[in-house]
Amino acid sequence: MRKGDRITGRNGVNYIVLETVGRGGQAKVWKVRDETSKKLYACKDYRHDPKNVRANIEQLIEIGAIKDRNGNVLDSVVMPITLVDGQGDSFGYVMELVDLKDYTTLKKAWLNPGKYPTPFAICNIVKNFALFFERLHLGHGLCYKDVNEGNIFFNPKSGD
């Protein structure tokens, strides 16, 4: 995937690749724009399929939104919307684009005392995680496998 590329999600929506917004050990994250609605999204682009991640993402897309026991959508987690097929075993998925300017990661918080969450925020982070994992694991029988200190984003003041 490169800047200016046109990609099509399995949902039939065409996106234009705009710019890189992040990168990790297995993938790059790009800002993309829906050609029709002009809405901005993020697209995580894997160079290959590590440990059958594609199958797990397909299951998450089938589920759609994760809901609590009362049927309310848990909006604290960004879920994949559609897959984007690449060359060979490369692939990506489109998700909502979140403005992360007021957010940090666990890794950065541990290294920078100024980014460390308040006690209230820590409780909110733990509550959000517990609700998500309870619904995903017990409610849908799936196991989320990409938890690490570099991809857990939160607001250090609120815990959102």
Image (cartoon, rainbow, N blue to C red):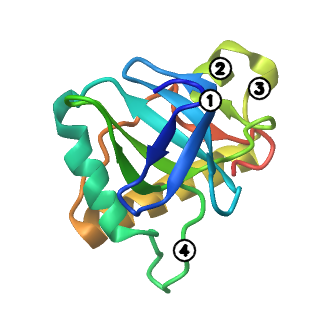
Point out residue 54 in the picture as x, y percentages from the top left corner. 25, 43
Point out residue 11 in the picture as x, y percentages from the top left corner. 40, 63
Residue marked by disc 4: 73
Which disc, if any, is residue 105? 1
Considering the numbered disc 3 on the image, is that residue within a helix, a strand or a loop?
helix
Q: In this view, which residue lies farthest toward the top?
A: 111
Q: Please tell me whether residue 26 is drawn above or below residue 141 in the rendered image.
A: above
Cα separation between marks 4 and 2: 28 Å
Cα separation between marks 1 and 3: 9 Å
Residue marked by disc 2: 108
Q: Please tell me whether residue 68 is drawn above or below residue 82 in the rendered image.
A: below
* Discs 3, 2 touching: Cβ within 8 Å: yes
Circle nearer the N terminus (1, 4): 4
Considering the numbered disc 2 on the image, is that residue within a helix, a strand or a loop?
helix
* Discs 1, 3 touching: Cβ within 8 Å: no
Q: In the shown orientation, is residue 84 left or right of residue 7?
A: left
Considering the numbered disc 1 on the image, is that residue within a helix, a strand or a loop?
strand
Mark 2 residue crowding within 10 angstroms, few (<14) / some (14–19) / many (20+) = some
Residue marked by disc 3: 115
Report the front residue among 78 and 38.
38
Mark 4 vs mark 3: give the one in front: 4
